Amino acid sequence: IFPPELRFAFLKFFNRIFHLFSSYCYFDITEIDGVNTNELYNAVQLYLSSSVSIAGNRLSLTRAVNSSSITFGLSNNDSIVDTFNNVTVLWEHVVTQRQTQTFAWRPLPEEKRGFTLCIKKRDKALILSSYLDYIMERANEIRRKNQDRLLYTNSRGGSLDSRGHPWESVPFKHPSTFETLAMDPVKKQQIMDDLKDFAEGQMFYQKTGRAWKRGYLLYGPPGTGKSSMIAAMANHLGYDIYDLELTEVHSNSELRKLLMKTSSKSIIVIEDIDCSINLTNRKKNSNATTQRSYYDMETRLGTGSGEESGNGGNTITLSGLLNFTDGLWSCCGSERIFVFTTNHIDKLDPALLRSGRMDMHIHMSYCDFPSLKILLKNYLGYEEEDVDDDVLKEMERVVEKAEMTPADVSEALIKNRRDKDRAVRELLEDVKSRGDGNVKDGNVKDGKLRGQSGNLTELEILEEEEKRAIDSQNEEEDSDEEEIEVEDNICKD
Ligand SMILES: Nc1ncnc2c1ncn2[C@@H]1O[C@H](COP(=O)(O)OP(=O)(O)OP(=O)(O)O)[C@@H](O)[C@H]1O
Ligand SMILES: [Mg+2]
């Protein structure tokens, strides 16, 4: 009988009156806030999942693909009571069908989900000041404890999913830890201490006016454990990993968007940075080196000298990357670690290496004696006293000269892991033959060239040559002794 406008006005008026006299107030926490995913929604969901499992009568159970744990959740339009500081609150999970959309610049999920928090008006101040913070903290804790950390990739390119995320995620379950990582224990301890200081350093960063982030550059030959180190870092700190594939990023602004969508307490990784983007000065480098780079980015990437070049801004440049790690944008969110890895540190632009940019440069080197002992323990369960003294001494003598990577050693050990004595014997032979071979050859630096297989491809040989050039350059400063040794051998020969 009444026209709809009148009915609507009446309802609104009635609602107002009702709320005026009601002693309750309500807060809506929707899953999608405008276009962004609402972090609070996810936090509340996680927070409630820990209590609904005990209290709820009707629960929704979910188990994400590859996840190890089952998550409890409130069923649609169900509610639960929670108490905080002796204040009782009511949570309701509200799910409604979304009206068919006329036009949306990206598809939204069909259901509109949200939580409604109902509290007494007199408790409002208390709740708003600390309850929500408490929920965020608890949710983070639960997430870390569940061990369901995530590995994100941007393999979709710049496109967004229905929840507005450019990142795709899978549960991260890499078993590498600092314990299993074979490297010099002193160096390992330094890195662990550094990570600890970082994770606990909120006050320090605030006091010194620095953004709460830290950069590590891992460099060294393939198979020396750079990726394993990143996994160990993530496992140690309980952080998520964002594996940024630069070849999928088309412009600096896309890079910025990706960064904005990373959460805090995360490690942002760019692997093989020398291969995925040309970060050195193009002009200087436009010879053989660039011809054999893995991806020919010449047409797509900028000059790397700072400005975006002329192809419609469709480039990602060194300055873009530096802004990403270092500039104003890098501190949206906090507690972030950037890790770059490379096999060729000399190919990187000095701007990326200057002090203060990457806080720590970590050299992952060939297997040395302490690392070898760790691998023996990991793979065979051998402590030092389980191995014959003479064998150990012999290994100690030759292992560094052999220039085997931890990956080479692991492989040798895995091959014979059912027969431990044989594994040790064969490893010793392998190490000795390589080590003594290296001493004879003197100036041939990399074990792989003389290694098991003589059939390296042309690309690999080019790479090896390049690596040797780099190695000799790197070692100019720090290994005068070795050079003398090599020269001695040449003289003997
Ligand atoms: N330092 C190490 N400690 C323990 N295991 C190692 C170590 N280095 C290599 N490995 C073993 O070798 C394999 C390859 O190592 P990883 O992928 O970490 O090397 P990388 O340095 O990242 O190589 P690339 O430069 O080719 O990416 C790993 O699966 C791991 O088992
Ligand atoms: Mg790697």
Image (cartoon, grey):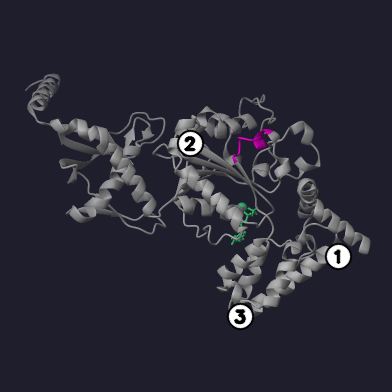
**Depicted 388 relative to depicted 232: above or below:** below
**Depicted 322 relative to depicted 467: above or below:** above
Q: Is residue 51 left or right of residue 284?
A: left
* Disc 3/disc 1 C-alpha distance (Å): 32 Å
Q: Which residues are magenta?
A: 351-359
Toward which corner of the image does residue 186 lie, by quadrant? bottom right
Which residue is labeled 2 in the image? 212
Q: Is residue 305 left or right of residue 380?
A: right
**Amino acid at dot 2:** Trp
Lower position in the chain sequence, tag 3 or tag 2: 2
Which residue is labeled 3 in the image? 419
Percent across and percent down for residue 435 are 78, 66
Element carrying mark 2 = loop
Percent across and percent down for residue 457 are 77, 57
The dominant secondary structure in magenta is: loop
**Amino acid at dot 3:** Asp
Which residue is labeled 1 in the image? 440
**Depicted 201 relative to depicted 328: above or below:** below
The residue located at (49%, 51%) in the rendering is 234
The nearer-to-camera label among 3 and 1 is: 1
Q: Is residue 407 left or right of residue 9?
A: right
